């Protein structure tokens, strides 16, 4: 294998994202190994009007959420998903999940994105969650949505 295969999994610590991650690990092993990029996104809405003080507090809260996600969600996930031939990296960022995951896929030259889906409202009738739907709209690589 001349260039290492990379897959991205949108991961939130839930059962659906764990299923998506296990699927991606299995596919990497079938291809002879590669890198799994687990991605957790702390949500951020830039449309809220805030004072400078409120922004400082929000920034501090995001930093705490990122540290907590790395320790409480990503570390256990790396242990659960450990598999021969598969390198597992975690990425915890602040932003909009679909945008972050698609940007990371571009930056890392990932071959595929795996995402579990949760549904609510109109998108539930379509069978997709809003993050999964956003990724399908923005992604430049194949996307596997795991029910």
Image (spheres, rainbow, N blue to C red):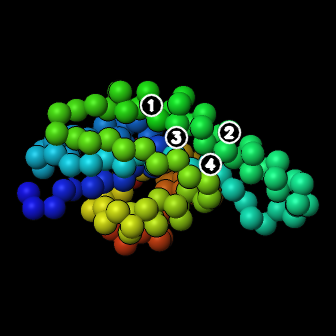
Q: Is residue 48 left or right of residue 35?
A: right
Q: Mark 4, mark 2: which one is toward the viewer?
A: 2
Give x and y (percent) for residue 60: 75, 45
State the residue at coordinates (60%, 34%): 68
Quadrant of the rendered image containing residue 29: top left
Give x and y (percent) for residue 90: 42, 44
Q: In what element is the residue under mark 2?
A: helix
Q: Nearer the viewer, residue 51 or 27?
A: 51
State the residue at coordinates (69%, 56%): 44
Residue that badge 2 annotates:
64
N-terminal label among 2 and 1 = 2
Q: Mark 3, mark 2: which one is toward the viewer?
A: 2
Query: Quarter of the image containing the C terminus?
Result: top left
Give x and y (percent) for residue 74: 47, 35
Residue 48, labelled with which disc?
none
Distance between the alpha carbons at the discs numbered 2 and 1: 16 Å
Q: In what element is the residue under mark 1?
A: helix
Q: In what element is the residue under mark 4?
A: strand
Distance between the alpha carbons at the discs numbered 4 and 3: 9 Å
State the residue at coordinates (52%, 61%): 100
Residue that badge 1 annotates:
75
Q: Residues within 10 Å of mark 1 (few under 14, many from 20)?
A: few
State the residue at coordinates (46%, 67%): 103
Residue that badge 4 annotates:
42
N-terminal label among 3 and 2 = 3
């Amino acid at each position: 294998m001349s260039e290492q295969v990379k897959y991205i999994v949108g991961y939130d610590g839930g059962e659906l994202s764990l299923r998506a991650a296990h699927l991606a690990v299995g596919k990497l092993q079938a291809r002879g190994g590669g890198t799994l990029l687990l991605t957790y996104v702390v949500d951020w809405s830039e449309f809220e009007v805030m004072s400078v003080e409120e922004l400082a507090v929000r920034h501090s809260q995001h930093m705490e959420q990122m540290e907590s996600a790395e320790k409480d969600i990503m570390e256990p996930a790396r242990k659960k998903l450990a598999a021969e031939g598969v390198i597992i990296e975690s990425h915890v960022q602040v932003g909009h999940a679909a945008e972050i995951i698609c940007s990371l896929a571009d930056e890392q030259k990932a071959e595929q994105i795996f995402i579990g889906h949760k549904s609510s409202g109109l998108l539930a009738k379509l069978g997709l969650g809003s993050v999964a739907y956003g990724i399908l709209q923005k992604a430049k690589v194949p996307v596997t949505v795991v029910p």
